[in-house]
Amino acid sequence: MRRKIGDPELVKGLTAAYSRRKFFVKFILVLLAFATGVVTVMNLRKPGGPDGVTRKGIDVVIALDVSRSMLATDLAPNRLERARQFISRLLTKIPDDRIGLVVFAGKAYLQMPLTGDHNAAQLFVSSASPDGIPLQGTVISDALKMSNTAFGASESTYKAVVLITDGEDHDEAALSTAKELASYGMMINTVGIGSAEGAYVPDPDTGEPKRDETGNPVLSKLNEAELKEIAGLTNGVYVRLENSEEAVNTITQQLGQIETKVTGDVSRMNYTTYYWCFAGAMLLLLLIESFIPETKKVLA
């Protein structure tokens, strides 16, 4: 090997002070430092106490209609914005409940799974719009089924849906779906958005009233009859959104009739962390490694 490098005697003289044992020790120290660094990044922790670990509440899924008809202006500034304001006030009234969010138009999507993080819920609600749903229309049955899916395989109690829509349903399965979900113990509270007289649906591109295939302006009216029936089938309550505060009070009173449960809330949990122990060990190992030379004493 020395011959391949150069003159054997010269190579021997240049490497005479090299210590394989010290080099191996330095390598092991660096390897241990890397391992403790990985553990530091993992941030090992354990629950540090009972404060804020649990909350007592129910599971509530908010199903929000984001179809184009929700842009109608019979409620100022428009139906969708009033719905957002309603949800924002509702969340402040039910701080101990877990919240899920389903948005729907021609198809329903789970926008946010059940969580105790109401700040996240506020962000998702504020960003909900018709642009996020490629298939337009209003299919309430699909929204109810997706809301049921959001609850997962949990027990059949403590669950409620708040359905917020103008009620213009393009599917006839909503009532049968509501009956089925009622048999599972689900309460569906409905919030009607809009007016009986209706309003024209604005075209997002031109700002003018949207027109149907025959060229007539599309008039969207509140369908209270179906929303009342859905609520009645599931022991829920129907409220027409005119005064947001009154509507919120009506819904929260109805939700208050559901038996509450104690649920774990990670967002409020206190932890004892141990990353600093491993960070200190990593720095100590690197410090020790830096003071160990790779050479040995050579007798003259």
Image (tube, grey):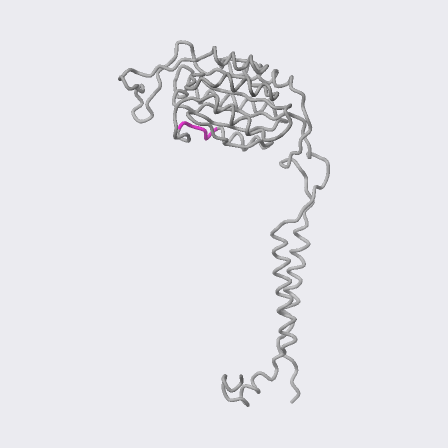
The quarter of the rendered structure image containing the C terminus is bottom right
Magenta-colored stretch includes residue 256 = no
Q: Nearer the viewer, residue 68 or 281?
A: 68
Could you tell me which residue is drawn at 66 percent across and 82 percent down? 297
The quadrant in which residue 94 appears is top right
Give residue 160's position: percent from left, percent from top: 59, 22
Q: Is residue 217 left or right of residue 253?
A: left
Give residue 167's position: percent from left, percent from top: 45, 16
Magenta-colored stretch includes residue 128 = yes
Q: Which residues are magenta?
A: 126-130
All told, the count of numbered labels is 0
Give residue 61's position: percent from left, percent from top: 55, 25
Could you tell me which residue is drawn at 44 percent across and 12 percent down? 223
The quadrant in which residue 37 appears is bottom right
Q: Nearer the viewer, residue 138 or 276?
A: 138
Could you tell me which residue is drawn at 68 percent across and 42 percent down? 271
Give residue 298's position: percent from left, percent from top: 65, 85
